[in-house]
Image (cartoon, rainbow, N blue to C red):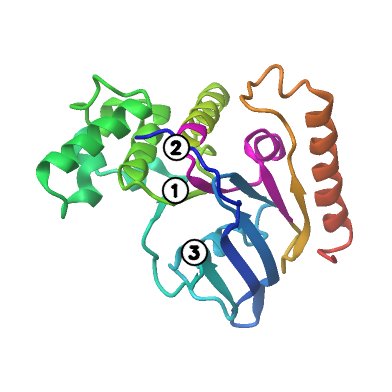
């Protein structure tokens, strides 16, 4: 995987225009408009039940909005677009327990020539720190290692856009920290566009270059925030930096305000 360098203007990779989604009489999200910048980590943060995962399904093309449009690389999204990969929260359901690590990672690459497929698999496994564990089954691995396999499988497809739905919610605190650092390292090296949904405020500020704060349902965009914390980041110096504390406090206030006002913008 070649290290990313870019000399071009950073245009939005993904554009959401007036996205609303209803399930019968239940309005989950309303009039969501946001730009996801290319080659950055963007995070959608909001309270539980605010429609973050619904929004991610619409972005991925797995669901259609009731109103509005999603545009990826200038093209309207209808169905899963080329160049997109997704990592889900529940790694135990996203991996095939009867396949070893290398076969799990190779699963989406069945149409590639064998030599190219094997090269991509080896590269992705090494990128997530699992070299030497290729022949293990998922059930022989810890939760954190299983989620690394899921990330490797997404990377092996060489995506332009990586979507992650609460990817670290099912692992312990130390594993979460390790996986957060792994993601930042890979993203900085490869330059892919990453969009994560989470309800964890610390995680959103630590990972993000760009945060979209959602209100309580029916959700609207409460605010978008550009996170000007330096890279590389680490859990001690970054999280004790006054700017991190300031941004975290601001996001907390935004979420608290939307709860008190019932989701009003």
Region in magenta: 188-213
Q: Is residue 74 left or right of residue 34?
A: left
Does residue 50 lie above or below 132 as drawn?
below
Does residue 7 lie above or below 101 as drawn?
below
Measured in 3D between alpha carbons, the distance from the residue under mark 2 to the one under mark 3, in whole angstroms, is: 18 Å
Secondary element at tag 2: helix
Give whichever of discs 1 and 3 has the lower sequence position: 3
Asked if the stretch drawn in magenta spans residue 208, the answer is: yes
The residue mark sitting in front, 2 or 1, is: 2
Label 2 crowd bin: few (<14), some (14–19), many (20+), radius 10 Å: some
Measured in 3D between alpha carbons, the distance from the residue under mark 2 to the one under mark 1, in whole angstroms, is: 20 Å
Does residue 177 lie above or below 63 as drawn?
above
Q: Is residue 161 visible?
A: yes
User: Which of 144 and 32 lies nearest the eye of the viewer?
Assistant: 32
Does residue 158 lie above or below 216 as drawn?
above
Secondary element at tag 3: loop
The residue tagged 1 is: 88
Label 1 crowd bin: few (<14), some (14–19), many (20+), radius 10 Å: some
The residue mark sitting in front, 1 or 3, is: 3
């Amino acid at each position: 995987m070649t290290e990313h360098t870019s000399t071009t203007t950073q245009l939005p990779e993904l554009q959401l225009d007036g996205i609303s989604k209803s399930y019968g009489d239940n309005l989950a999200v309303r009039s969501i408009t946001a730009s996801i910048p290319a080659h950055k980590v963007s995070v959608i943060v909001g309270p539980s039940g605010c429609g973050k995962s619904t929004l991610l399904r619409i972005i991925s093309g797995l669901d259609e909005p009731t109103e509005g449009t999603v545009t990826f690389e200038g093209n309207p999204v209808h169905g899963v677009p080329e160049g997109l990969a997704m990592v889900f929260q529940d790694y135990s359901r996203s991996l095939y327990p009867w396949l070893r690590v290398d076969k799990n990672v190779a699963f989406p690459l069945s149409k590639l020539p064998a030599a190219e497929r094997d090269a991509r698999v080896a590269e992705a496994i090494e990128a997530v720190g699992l070299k030497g564990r290729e022949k293990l089954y998922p059930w022989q691995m810890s939760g954190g290692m299983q989620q690394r396999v899921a990330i490797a499988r997404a990377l092996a497809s060489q995506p332009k856009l990586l979507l992650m739905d609460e990817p670290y919610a099912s692992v312990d605190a130390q594993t979460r920290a390790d996986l957060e650092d792994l993601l930042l390292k890979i993203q900085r090296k490869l330059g892919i566009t990453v969009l994560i949904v989470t309800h964890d405020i610390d995680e959103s500020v630590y990972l993000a270059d760009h945060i979209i704060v959602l209100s309580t349902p029916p959700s609207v965009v409460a605010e978008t925030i550009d996170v000007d914390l330096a890279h590389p980041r680490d859990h001690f110096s970054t999280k004790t930096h006054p700017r991190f504390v300031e941004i975290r406090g601001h996001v907390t206030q935004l979420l608290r305000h939307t709860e008190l006002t019932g989701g009003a913008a």
